[in-house]
Image (tube, helix red, strand yellow):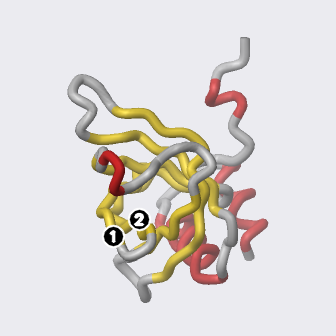
Amino acid sequence: MVSSVEQRITERIIVTQNLEIISGSKVTPAVMENISDKGLYLIAPSCGKELSLKPGTIHELRFIPLKGEPFSIPCAVKWSYKMPPHGLTSSVGMEALHKTPAYKRYLKSLLIDIINPSPKYREMLKTMI
């Protein structure tokens, strides 16, 4: 049996940063835990009917980087589940549907900030330049 880590197509960058999930006029704060050139993993409050986190649902994510201007990209929910024990937050995997130049610059800046990147991260950086 292949583990989910072995099934990953791209290397993930571990980063904890606030962002916003935008769905219509509703803005929900969330915390990104890791990111790649294909998508990201985040933790969001379980908002009931106010915010659907069902697979296939498309939301806009607004990134507020420490360096540079805020930017948004459309993302699709790939998977989500309420976190135990009380289900007050949800773990969510999202796919980046349109990788804007701002998204690519953001990823590149994260990779450059890694003091001693592994060979996998170096290869990821080369494909982004």
Which residue is rendered at x = 39% and y = 82% of the image? 67
Category of crowding for the residue at label 1, using alpha-carbon neighbours closer than 10 angstroms: few (below 14), some (14–19), many (at least 20): some
Q: Nearer the viewer, residue 57 or 68?
A: 57
SS assignment at label 2? strand
- Amino acid bearing label 1: Val
Q: Nearer the viewer, residue 81 or 110?
A: 81
The answer to whether residue 117 is visible is no
Q: Nearer the viewer, residue 27 or 120?
A: 27
Label ID, residue 21: 2
Percent x, y for residue 73? Answer: 57, 73
Percent x, y for residue 80? Answer: 48, 39
The extreme bottom residue here reads: 69
Label ID, residue 2: none
Asked if residue 31 is positioned above or below residue 89 in the image, the reply reads below
Category of crowding for the residue at label 2, using alpha-carbon neighbours closer than 10 angstroms: few (below 14), some (14–19), many (at least 20): many
Does the CB distance between marks 2 and 1 fall below 8 Å? yes
Percent x, y for residue 48? Answer: 32, 46
